[in-house]
Amino acid sequence: MRGQLAEARLPAIFVRMKPDSLLYPAPKGLYCQKGDFYIDPVQPVERALITHGHSDHARAGHRRVLATRETLDIMRIRYGDGFCGESEIAKLGEAMTVNGVRVSFHPAGHVLGSAQIAVEAGGKRIVVSGDYKRRSDPTCRPFEPVSCDVFITEATFGLPVFHHPDDRAETARLLASLKQFPERAHVVGAYALGKAQRVIALLRQQGYDEPIHIHGALAKLCEYYRTEGIDLGDLRPATLAGDKRPDFAGGIVIGPPSAFADRWARRFAEPVAAFASGWMLIRQRAKQRGVELPLVISDHCDWAELTGTIREIAPAEVWVTHGREEALVRWCELECIPARPLHLVGYDDEGE
Amino acid sequence: MKAFAELLGRLVLTPQRNAKIRLLADYFRSTPDPSRGFALAAIAGTLSLNTVKPALIRDLLLERMDEVLFHYSYDYVGDLAETVSLAWEPPQGTAPADIPLGEVVERLQRAGRSEVRSLVRDVLDRLDTAGRFAFLKLVTGGLRIGVSARLAKQALADMGGKDIGEIETLWHGLSPPYLPLFLWLSGEAEMPVLTTPAVFHSVMLATPIGEGDLEGLDPADFAAEWKWDGIRVQLANIGGVRRLYSRSGDEISGAFPEIIEAADIAGVIDGELLVGGTMRTNRATATFGDLQQRLNRKTVNRKLFEDFPAFIRGYDILFSGERDMRPEPFQTRRQALAALIDAASPQHFDLSPLVPFSTWEELDRLRSEPPDPVIEGIMLKRLDSPYLAGRMKGPWFKWKRAPFNIDAVLMYAQRGHGKRSSYYSDFTFGVWTEAEGGTALVPVGKAYFGFTDAELEVLDRFVRDNTVERFGPVRAVRAEPDAGFVVEVAFEGLNRSTRHKSGVAMRFPRIARLRPDKLPREADRLETLQAMIGIKS
Ligand SMILES: [Zn+2]
Ligand SMILES: [Zn+2]
């Protein structure tokens, strides 16, 4: 990949904004001075509102946390009971008041429990989308557009080259490869929260009912999804003990991407390395990672969905963060929508 | 186009040869004519299409896209065809349909110059992303998928349950979309009969001498000749049609016009293509490195032709005129070959001399100290053996001169593919040289085989425990005079190289032994390698 633009990511220049603006980027994250709270702060703060459970958005160590019940559960699973001083459940669609500022949470369609956060004061409403997508996902509630004055959108896949294909066609490719190479284990890299469960659910929807083997790092979250009523079928640990086919030939194994560089990956029969990620659209990315079967399945919007969402919500202003800000800002300019990059730091725009 | 696009995508990312063959064979089995024939042609490099300039596809995208957004996109993706295939948005209301590859190729072949632009736009509108990518690579001539024509032929053989030799024999007599070939392979017709006489015939190959192979064999039953370090070729002149083929059946007549012109012989011969002078003109044979200069040229360069004239050193004969000599014993064939070469141009043809010997020990000595640097070993041929297609053990053996060995220091490692994807199994190694700040290591080669599984475990552990820096997938390992890992590297020869910082390029390097007993400071120096340049093993 050439990606000079990606590498030459601008340093943390904070956009100059009027001090009285309702939300502005501060070193610890997006801050609301009036309500004295942060949204998805990257360092421990007194009061945090959290959009979803991915570790770059949901960090441990805040004194008070307001988030959906599922996000709080996920944080507890990941960080333990003491993940924060005090937690409070935000019900989707219900307005609350935090130090005189109205806040409400709305589904974002990204992963289980993910929410957009609307912040409202003085007759002005800002919606922080967090990470979001518009495709249907059997493992979480769909995105709901909320009208607002300022829409803060992510731009992980904010380049016109990103057009994600139909996710069902991608899992169908995995099943086709399994038929074509029945003597090989198909080892799929997928992020532990959201992606892994979505891939499993998609395979089940397509009638694949063999046991699926999962890496230990996925076990607790898959179990949690199950208790939330998401049927993932027969899941078994991808360990050697007691299994009849210890090399998993002809089977599907799912693990977090980080496990592929480990000795863990050695136990499989002539593995076909697959990886489920929006980045797999770029051939060089797949090649660099040694992926043989790239599955383009993303939990973020593609370009058409980002621009479509902005058109649909029609906010007076768009703030862009998280990813390829410059291209989406340029698009807004062409559409005569006032827009600015936020240059927030500390979020992982590659992990997908 | 969908199936072809999926095939290309998989082939590029699949490292294992057998898996590639299966992907190809399954595609050929499940795709109708003429699409599969055009796909075969695209992969084997026999498809001729009016190519489209990259500027045209860029222009087509810019008809619909802001230039700034295009630059952001292209800069990120780095490949024009891929950028266009990904960023292309068909007009509202056009649902992507699948156009068969055959239809696309036929439309392109029919289109006049002025129609190309709208044709490309129209096809782009109707394909999906992967289809657009395959299409653009096809029309811009940038289809590079790491599949040789030989591999494609092996897939055809697998598909039809035939021998690859039969396919190679037919290959140059057929043309895209290869309808009679596929009819035969799918069992719906007899083997096609060729109209062009000067076709390629599968060559006879030798097996390497292994431990104990010579025990029980009588030296009197064999002829020995030198194994020359050029490229094995087949030259055909049947009924005035002249062709020069590589040993895998690729036609290379264009690169060696002087051979074609001088091929005033009737029949088909097997030999080594070399450059320099023939024995009949008493001039020295030049090295493989010199021959490579000729091979890598697309266009004729007068100076190269004068400096490195090509000739064929004859090994064997398949046809004398129309007469099939292949069933005859080696001795009879050799006489026919000698007579034919004697009558041919002395500048362009000579006969590979036989090496007299009476015991295997004597031959072993000759093998390890050959009289000419362009010799890479000995060939042993049974006197009574017919000329058989392919490689079988018994009639022909090759006995290579021992390779070169040096001690080098591991510098970088990268993870392997497939079974080895969790191991650091691709190694870059270096030797010492004087650099600005004193003595330093300079990389001289890369190897990813030669070691046992147990040795790989040792190397992998060393890499993981001694990584000093990472560059993407590559790890730099500790390599200092008193700390690091020494390996014995074996290779077949060295060429001068301007592409490598060290100025040398190894041929077929492999890790022969691990030397944990040595310190990096004891490894070899670049001067040792420089002295080996031009010498062939
Ligand atoms: Zn996320
Ligand atoms: Zn995120």
Image (cartoon, coloured by chain):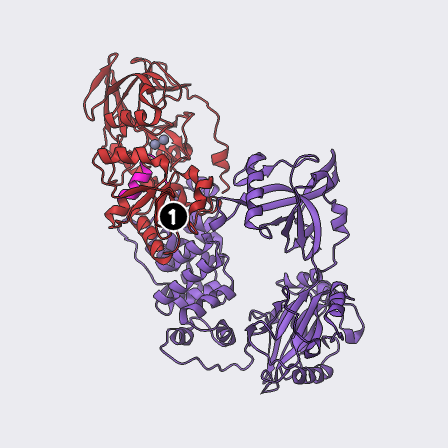
Q: Position of residue B211 (x, y in %)?
A: 64, 64
Could you say which is closer to the camera, residue B336 or residue A81? A81
Q: Magenta stretch: residue B526 in it?
A: no
Could you say which is closer to the camera, residue A299 or residue A312? A299
Work out whether residue A123 can be spotted.
yes
Q: Is residue B38 left or right of residue A335?
A: right
Where is mark 1, residue-wise?
A: A246
Q: Position of residue B150 (x, y in %)?
A: 51, 66
Query: Height in image: A31 above or below A284?
Result: above
Q: Which quadrant would the N terminus of chain B be assigned to in this image?
A: bottom left
Colour red belongs to chain: A
Colour purple belongs to chain: B
Residue positioned most to the left: A94
Q: Quadrant of residue A157?
A: top left
Residue lying at 58% horizontally and 71% vertically, measured from the top left? B393
Query: Height in image: A162 above or below B56?
Result: above
Kindly identify which chain the residue marked by label 1 belongs to: A
Q: Is residue B236 left or right of residue B8?
A: right
Q: Position of residue B161 (x, y in %)?
A: 42, 72
Work out whether residue A163 can be spotted.
no
Determine the secondary structure under disc 1.
Answer: loop
Q: Magenta stretch: residue A194 in it?
A: yes
The total number of labels drawn is: 1
Q: Quick check: which quadrant has ligand 1?
A: top left
Q: Is residue B102 left or right of residue B285?
A: left
Q: Which residues are magenta?
A: A190-201
Q: Quadrant of residue B269?
A: bottom right
Q: Residues within 10 Å of mark 1 (few under 14, many from 20)?
A: some
